[in-house]
Amino acid sequence: MAETTQAACTDDSPTTTQTARERVLAALPLPPLDGLSEAQVRGATCVWDGVALTSLTAVDLGPRPKRRPGGTYQWFPRGCRRCVGRRAYRYLFDHAPGCEHCQKSPTCPIAVEVHRLIREGH
């Protein structure tokens, strides 16, 4: 089962958009690595639905650590814009209820970035 993490809303620096995007993408739950095809693991196809990706359709989800006997390694999953938008939409339901920034203002950097990802997915 995929694990979801809560992205914090504490960075109000000028690079918030980039930082928030990386935080949101890192928080999106992925399917188990063991059940993915070689193309999905390599990032040639979407990690969720297996559709072929191009430089225009792929969203890099950031490095993810994977433990295995003898150590840990990084893999670099990618998703299609549609699947990323759908996962971001679901993530917003986990994020917003516990976020003080979301409760007070529509300018939470995490929520703003989630909305961008949702729009990019359509």
Image (cartoon, grey):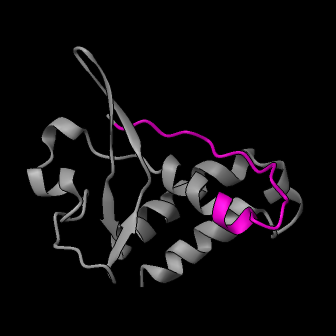
The location of residue 41, given as percent across then percent down, is: 20, 50
Q: In the displayed structure, does residue 122 sit left or right of residue 116?
A: left
Give the residue at x 25% y 79%: 54
Bounds of the magenta segment: 2-19
Name, please, the residue furthest toward the top: 70
Give the residue at x 50% y 49%: 26
- The secondary structure that most of the magenta stretch takes on is loop
Name, please, the residue furthest toward the right: 104
Camera-side residue of 55 and 109: 55
Give the residue at x 87% y 65%: 105
The location of residue 69, given as percent across then percent down, is: 22, 15
Residue 66, placed above or below residue 80: above
Q: In the displayed structure, does residue 115 sit left or right of residue 100?
A: left
Quadrant in the rendering for residue 2: top left
The location of residue 100, given as percent across then percent down, is: 84, 49
- As for residue 36 lying within the magenta part, the answer is no
- As for residue 8 lying within the magenta part, the answer is yes
